[in-house]
Amino acid sequence: MPRIPPFLQLIIVAIVVHVTLAGVRVTTALYALSQQASEFSVGILIGLIAFFPMLLAVPLGRFADRVGFARPMAIGALLSLLGSLLPAALPGMQVLYPSAILIGVGFTAVHIGVQHAVGVVSNDNNRAANFSWLSAGFSTSSFSGPVLAGLLIDYASYPVAYGVFAFTSTVGLIVVARGGIRQLDRGRVTPPRVKGRAIDLLRAPEMRSIFFIGILLAAAWDLFTFVMPLHGSRLGFSASTIGLILGVFSIATFAVRLGLPMIARHFSEWQILTSALVLSVVCYLLFPFMNQPITIMAVAAALGVALGSTQPNLLALLHRTAPPGRGGEAIGVRTTMGNASQVILPIAFGGAGAALGIVVVFWGIAAMIGAGVPIAWKKANQSKGEPDG
């Protein structure tokens, strides 16, 4: 694919493989519920998507530092393809477990490879903007994956939905194998690696703050995609309506990311992150009172604006703060922490939802996110008057 710029090819691969992940998360949750699985069992399934990536993210980050970003992306797209094909060919609950593992590991490999690639090929002047474009791509897939899943489930079948998501991962594999990403990889300049253990990255106060706030915001995003199908099913919404709610959230993340370069001229990264945390808390407090699709969509859009503004700022902070030659490893550490929360929190909140009700789940998430506000507020005050463009 020589006519497509290599940077755009990176974004295409990120989009199509993320379509698979975002679509399969919704499809698997609704398919398990249709098989009379409990909310706790659904939590285990969704948590399983993140469990093995939690264990493998740091090794994958070091692998990307050592061999480049094209090979992890190709391996990840292949695993995602295989994970989607399994439930497309074999019906039943049992096959969902290996499917979740393959898709989770596959997307993580692609995710680390793409983020590392953008950091490597960017400079201090365009890094934040390039991450904004990448994040806008993820917003596109966050919208299209759930909406496509809902439509395919309602108007075709679960196996057809899984088959379509296998196709999207196939597109990603073809782009990596035949496109210009490998040439971009071979032309990269790798700084000398500063040796050290992954735990050393946590000893720097700035890195700890970035990782902690990143975990909270990632949890706010992932728990929305987990809790909303449960909430929608309890309210009697169809799969396509639930997918549309998730899609509205993603449209909002896309819209705010288009405006981030302008926002960054007036506010620092930490000021934006603080505002996102506060707005996310408010949204989760409001969700239990919303019982109609239109009102839930309105709050979901506000949550999308909040969370959509965070990833480019976090990634820019992370790449600027990480030791030379350890950018991939730093992404791996962040991914490990995020995946740990994805393993634990769906199970914990799924159990809480089954035992105590959905209100406790939403307000528990709000309290968890609120724990990061004081730290981000302090950092924002330190950076006041120093906007990063």
Image (cartoon, rainbow, N blue to C red):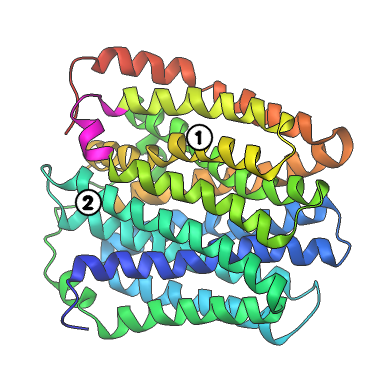
Q: Which mark is residue 302?
A: 1
Q: Residues within 10 Å of mark 2 (few under 14, many from 20)?
A: many
Q: Is residue 330 above or below residue 95?
A: above
Q: Is residue 124 above or below residue 367?
A: below
- Determine the residue positioned at 58% across, 51% down: 246
Residue type at numbered disc 2: Asn
Which residues are drawn in magenta? 260-269
- Tell which of 244 and 316 is nearer to you: 244
Task: Report whether residue 238 is seen.
Answer: yes
Count all numbered tags in the image, as a single digit: 2
Question: Residue 180 is drawn in which quadrant?
Answer: bottom left
Q: Residues within 10 Å of mark 1 (few under 14, many from 20)?
A: many
- Tell which of 19 and 63 is nearer to you: 19
Query: In the rendered image, which residue does mark 2 sit on?
Result: 130
- Is 264 magenta? The answer is yes
Q: Nearer the viewer, mark 1 or mark 2?
A: 1
Q: CA distance from mark 1 to mark 2?
A: 24 Å
Question: Residue 149 is drawn in which quadrant?
Answer: bottom right
